């Protein structure tokens, strides 16, 4: 009897076409093609749901990821862009005992690498005793000489370690690579988990899948512990910035774990410690979780060309004033050249046998190993010993010996003889397979799992699960999210107890969570970008509103824009840099200013808003962000190839609506702490400047009723004006409504009043009771607007007001955004 | 030979700069054949703090930080140094170069002066097959290493044009090699790259070279400049020996060492980070004079010539 005769026909149908690769271990079926027992509950669930329902749910998982803004940044054709996070919809199911073997093996490696780092960065006894060749350390680009002999402040090198594993043909786990520098992927693992557990909630419950939440709580506890005695440890996550491929994850983890997300430019460091430059002054950081490679961490002592690092960070580390996780230098033990030495090192350092084997590797710096590699080159891969590309010789992926021509072989033989130290030979990677859901069918795909281990105050803790990655084709030897492929979830069975299952959430249960209101301190750079995000959005809106005037759609039914008004609008657009020459007609003018190439065109301003916004993206709602990105792309396309689905004025209306949506979403979702104040401050100042310019342009020298009406439109004041005044538009009442009416949300006085409020609120967060220069300037301007008569606002006065607004903006910049404030000498720390 | 050294560096930040963090390697170090009797580093304006340290390779590093706005920075390093001449060497009796390479690869020490620290590519020294091949032409099988090194030193001198101004710190070695021109720093990096390509340990040396005025002309004060050359490890008996490819000579008693490392990045006289957007100017003057016997260690060093008008460039010292 075949196994399939005994089971549900729907289930056997599901597995019917599944053809594993011969000679390779498969997760789903055994060597006889029978599904493994621990997969049956999931398969039964899928069979019961039926293909259409399964497809619907998987589409739901994709939608969840897309709506959560889960992206991966990729580089293609010299351009980088966000790619939706591709997910394999089936989890890899692993049973409890099997997982235990893997988890213990990975934990052992964490202990091994910690001990190895402590030795190599310390006294290097392993080298002196001959257990490890000196060249394997000295030749490693991750061997940071400025930190040689320096013990980490918290006594540990590793806080998070990850191993990429797959299975040997006999089903045993083996390790493909070790990640000790700054392991990525734990955040994506959470998102995959949320997406899949939502898609298959019944199966998730039935199977008793181990939860991920406790792991992250442990990770956080371990990092807080690294701060030592600090009562309220301040932990920051150092990211290379929004251009990085895994920036999404940096922002996500920072938010989930309650860390401050910072870039190198946010920090100052010296022998007194590390601090974040915030709008409220310098704030000490106790623990720095780094997601930048060590080499880039400090331009003074490491790579001088780095723009990502923090000058003085190495000094702060040497002085023991900051714990870095993982410690600078931890990347040292990732080198493939070390692999062959691990079994011996493990016995020596831990007194244990290495539990998880590696793919067999020979370091060619040793004459005997070199001979072996040269002899067996046909069946081996030749790769760089330190994982980095050897320029002009070998890229980091290595080369298959079997693919070399005779001449190439001889060339490599020569290189190995001269500089064997740079090479390893290793057995080619052969990944085992697991099923993915492809067009309604189960299909085997090569995979690897990244397993994470975190240091906790009570020892290591393995994440029960991990980040699975699938190759898109069966013959792919390497996995990279950069090169395509999908990620997936790993379901570890065995969460039998209800208590374990109750721990479903990443963060503590809401009623048990510690209440924390402070959204974290606002870094000066983030404030700067929020401010300009506000200013650019507002400036784009002002420009578009001006263009709307060219359409001549007044409520009095005038269709043609009078020549005088066109001239005045064109003058304003030129002044704002939206157009650079005289346009022939209103339409040409509108198109040039909407998506022309000049720096002040609406398209360019929206792009600038997008750029500044991207720096503070973690503070914006995904909806606002998506709306802005769409608007930017739409305007850019209109410029590039004239692809305009709508006439120009319809495009302008649609762009104005999009901006209103972005601002509305930002207003509705942005936390009302410092960040929002800077965003709105930027908008108010920009709008106020726009108003002074408009007031000048549309009231100067014999302005006719059209011009005054335009000014009313810009301030949304026409209806109010008509109800207030029976006469037609006249200069003084129009100016009163547009400039001085504090009740009109688009009037100058209203903007200035908000500016004063924001500055007062922000200043209250800082110590000291002197009024800040920006606030003083704003108050003076507000008083003038309260007491003056509209008749006094001639061109000269308006120019003066504009200058005062600019002075306020400058004062804000100097006070809150300026870089280079000194770090106070503070001995009260650790 | 005993020398009095004066090395004055003036940075003109252009605009007032509130913050600057620097690492200075301007003080000569005592080492084999070189004794430093006295040294001083005068910094104007006074930095908020200045800390003297020794780096991994044994160089003297001064860490300075400014927290007060200033628009001009003057670094004035003076030292009194004695350098012993190199003992006589017999190139023919040095070991075959392959033996030296094998020893370096099999090293069991991680000490800063161990040859193993100097056989790998480094920030400014990438190994390229073309340079290795070219260098290999001097390193015929079993050739005694000193003989080969002297041949290479002469070959660089003969084949490359000394051309100031066409290269800077960021110029890739491949271009120097292709265009066959550059300055002392480029030649040093090139020679190091070639040697390491063959598996031979080679170190970068930054320092001063005593120059003699043309016959009949008076010495010009401040006319000297910083210089760069290399040291190659020639086996356990001979140890490290200095070669100056720019001048096709061995580094002997006219070469005064300030700092060494794997390449310029380890020995850079000034590495600085400043928060300034202004244009920057830099001028340097170096003065190396033979001390008149009997030298008094504390004697005031000669006054440097007035700095030449600064021209905008990156805040790094120009190599010779």
Image: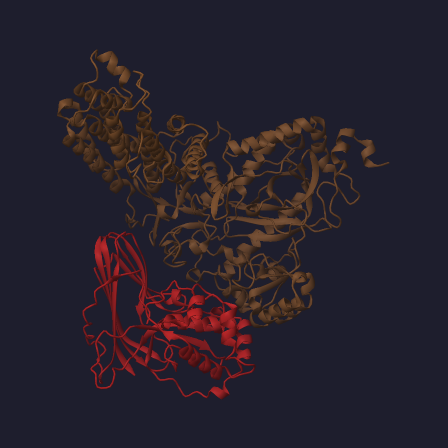
* Image hue for chain B: red
- Quick check: A633 above or below A147? above
Q: Give left or right: position of B254 versus A222.
A: left
Question: Can residue A57 be seen in the rendering of this structure?
Answer: yes
Residue A799 relative to residue B100: left or right: left
The quadrant where residue A93 appears: top right
**Rendered location of residue A627, percent (x, y):** 44, 31
Image coords of residue A401 (percent x, y): 66, 62
Q: Is residue A755 above or below residue A368?
A: above
> Looking at this view, is A338 or B305 the one in front?
B305
Residue A543's place in the image compared with A23, above or below, is above
Give the colour of chain A: brown
In the rendering, at what x and y percent does residue A796 appear?
14, 32
Q: Is residue A610 left or right of residue A343?
A: left
Foreground pick, A50 / A193: A50
Q: Can see residue A498?
A: no
Identify which residue is drawn at 54% across, 40% down: A188
Image quadrant in which you'd find residue A688: top left
Residue at the (25%, 27%) spot, across then down: A563
Front residue of A44/A531: it is: A531
């Amino acid at each position: 009897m075949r196994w399939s005769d005994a089971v549900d026909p729907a289930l056997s149908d599901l597995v019917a076409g599944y053809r594993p690769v011969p000679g390779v271990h498969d997760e789903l079926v055994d060597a006889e093609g029978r599904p493994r027992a621990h997969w049956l509950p999931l398969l039964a669930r899928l069979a019961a749901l039926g293909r259409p329902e399964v497809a619907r749910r998987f589409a739901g998982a994709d939608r969840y990821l897309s709506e959560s803004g889960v992206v991966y940044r990729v580089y293609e054709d010299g351009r980088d862009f966000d790619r939706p996070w591709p997910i394999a919809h089936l989890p890899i199911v692993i049973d409890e005992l099997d997982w235990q073997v893997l988890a213990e093996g990975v934990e052992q490696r964490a202990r091994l690498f910690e001990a190895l780092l402590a030795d190599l960065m310390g006294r290097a006894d392993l080298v002196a005793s001959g257990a490890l060749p000196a060249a394997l350390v000295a030749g490693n680009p991750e061997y940071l000489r400025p930190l040689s002999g320096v013990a980490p402040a918290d006594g540990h090198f590793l806080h998070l370690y990850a191993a990429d594993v797959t299975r040997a043909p006999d089903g045993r786990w083996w390790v493909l690579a070790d990640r000790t520098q700054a392991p990525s992927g734990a955040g994506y693992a959470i998102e995959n988990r949320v997406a899949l557990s939502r898609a298959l909630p019944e199966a998730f419950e039935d199977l008793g899948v181990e939860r991920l939440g406790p792991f992250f709580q442990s990770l956080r506890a371990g990092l807080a512990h690294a701060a030592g005695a600090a009562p309220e440890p301040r932990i920051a996550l150092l990211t290379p910035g929004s251009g990085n491929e895994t920036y999404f994850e940096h922002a996500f983890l920072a938010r989930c774990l309650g860390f401050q997300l910072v870039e190198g430019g946010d920090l100052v460091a010296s022998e007194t410690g590390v601090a974040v430059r915030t709008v409220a002054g310098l704030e000490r950081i106790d623990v720095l979780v780094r997601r930048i490679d060590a080499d880039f961490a400090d331009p003074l002592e490491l790579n001088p060309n780095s723009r990502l690092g923090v000058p003085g960070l190495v000094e702060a580390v040497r002085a023991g004033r900051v714990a870095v996780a993982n410690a600078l230098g931890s990347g040292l033990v990732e080198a493939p050249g070390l692999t062959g030495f691990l079994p011996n090192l493990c016995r020596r350092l831990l007194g244990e046998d290495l539990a998880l084997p590696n793919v067999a590797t020979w370091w060619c710096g040793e004459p005997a190993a070199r001979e072996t590699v040269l002899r067996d080159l046909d069946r081996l891969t030749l790769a760089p010993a330190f994982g980095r590309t050897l320029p002009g010789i070998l890229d980091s992926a290595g080369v298959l010996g079997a693919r070399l021509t005779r001449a190439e072989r001889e060339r490599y033989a020569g290189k190995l003889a001269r500089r064997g130290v740079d090479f390893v030979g290793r057995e080619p990677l052969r990944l085992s397979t697991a099923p993915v859901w492809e067009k309604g069918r189960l299909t085997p795909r090569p995979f690897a799992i990244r397993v994470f281990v975190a240091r906790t105050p009570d020892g290591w803790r393995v994440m029960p699960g991990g980040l699975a990655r699938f190759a898109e084709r069966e013959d792919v030897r390497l996995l990279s999210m950069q090169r395509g492929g999908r990620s997936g979830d790993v379901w570890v069975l065995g969460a039998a107890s209800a208590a374990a299952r109750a721990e479903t959430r990443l963060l503590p249960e809401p009623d048990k969570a510690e209440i924390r209101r402070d959204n974290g301190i606002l870094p000066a750079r983030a404030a700067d970008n929020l401010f300009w995000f506000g200013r650019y959005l507002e400036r784009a809106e002002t420009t578009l509103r001006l263009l709307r005037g060219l359409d001549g759609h007044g409520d009095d039914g005038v269709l043609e824009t009078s020549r005088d008004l066109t001239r005045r609008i064109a003058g304003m657009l030129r002044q704002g840099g939206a157009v650079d020459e005289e346009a022939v007609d209103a339409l040409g003018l509108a198109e040039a200013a909407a998506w022309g190439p000049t720096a002040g065109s609406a398209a360019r301003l929206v792009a600038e808003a997008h750029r500044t916004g991207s720096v503070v993206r973690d503070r914006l709602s995904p909806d606002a962000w998506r709306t802005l990105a769409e608007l930017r792309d739409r305007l850019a396309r209109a410029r590039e190839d004239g692809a305009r689905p709508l006439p120009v004025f319809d495009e302008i209306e649609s762009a104005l609506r999009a901006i209103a949506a972005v601002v509305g979403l930002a207003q509705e979702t942005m936390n009302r702490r410092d960040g929002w104040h800077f965003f709105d401050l930027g908008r108010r100042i920009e709008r106020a400047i726009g108003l002074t310019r408009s007031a000048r342009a549309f009231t100067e020298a014999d302005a006719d009723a059209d011009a005054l009406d335009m000014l009313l439109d810009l301030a949304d004041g026409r209806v109010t004006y008509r109800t207030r005044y029976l006469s037609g538009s006249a200069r003084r009442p129009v100016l009163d409504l547009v400039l001085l009416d504090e009740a009109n949300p688009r009037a100058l006085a209203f903007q200035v009043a908000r500016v004063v409020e924001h500055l007062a609120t922000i200043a209250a967060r800082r110590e000291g009771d002197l009024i800040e220069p920006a606030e003083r300037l704003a108050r003076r301007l507000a008083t003038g607007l309260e007491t003056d008569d509209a008749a006094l606002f001639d061109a000269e006065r308006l120019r003066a007001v504009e200058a005062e607004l600019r002075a306020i903006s400058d004062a804000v910049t100097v006070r809150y955004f300026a870089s280079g404030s000194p770090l106070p000498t503070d001995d009260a720390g650790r | 030979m005993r020398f009095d050294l004066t090395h004055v560096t003036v940075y003109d930040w252009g605009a007032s700069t509130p913050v600057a963090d620097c690492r200075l390697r301007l003080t000569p170090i005592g080492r084999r054949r070189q004794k430093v009797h006295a040294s001083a580093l005068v910094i104007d304006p006074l930095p908020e703090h200045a800390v003297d340290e020794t780096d991994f390779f044994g160089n003297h590093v001064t860490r300075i930080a400014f927290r007060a706005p200033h628009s001009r920075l003057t670094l004035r390093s003076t030292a009194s140094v004695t350098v012993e001449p190199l003992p006589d060497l017999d190139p023919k009796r040095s070991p075959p170069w392959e033996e030296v390479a094998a020893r370096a690869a099999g090293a069991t020490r991680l000490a800063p002066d161990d040859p193993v620290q100097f056989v790998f590519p480094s920030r400014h020294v990438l190994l390229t097959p073309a340079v290795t091949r070219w260098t290999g032409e001097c390193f015929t099988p079993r050739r005694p290493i000193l003989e080969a090194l002297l041949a290479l030193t002469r070959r660089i001198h003969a084949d490359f044009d000394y051309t100031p101004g066409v290269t800077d710190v960021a110029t890739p070695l491949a271009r120097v090699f292709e265009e066959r021109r550059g300055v002392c720093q480029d030649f040093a990096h090139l020679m190091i790259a070639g040697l390491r390509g063959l598996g031979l340990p080679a170190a970068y040396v930054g320092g001063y070279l005593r120059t003699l005025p043309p016959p009949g002309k008076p010495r010009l004060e401040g006319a000297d400049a910083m210089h760069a050359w290399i040291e190659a490890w020639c086996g356990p008996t001979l140890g490290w020996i200095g070669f100056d490819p720019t001048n096709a000579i061995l580094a002997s008693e006219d070469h005064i060492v300030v700092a060494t490392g794997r390449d310029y990045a380890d020995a850079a006289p000034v590495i600085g980070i400043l928060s300034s957007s202004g244009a920057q100017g830099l001028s340097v003057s170096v003065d190396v004079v033979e001390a008149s016997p009997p030298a008094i260690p504390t004697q005031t060093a000669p006054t440097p010539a007035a700095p030449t008008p600064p021209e905008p460039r990156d805040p790094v010292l120009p190599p010779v």
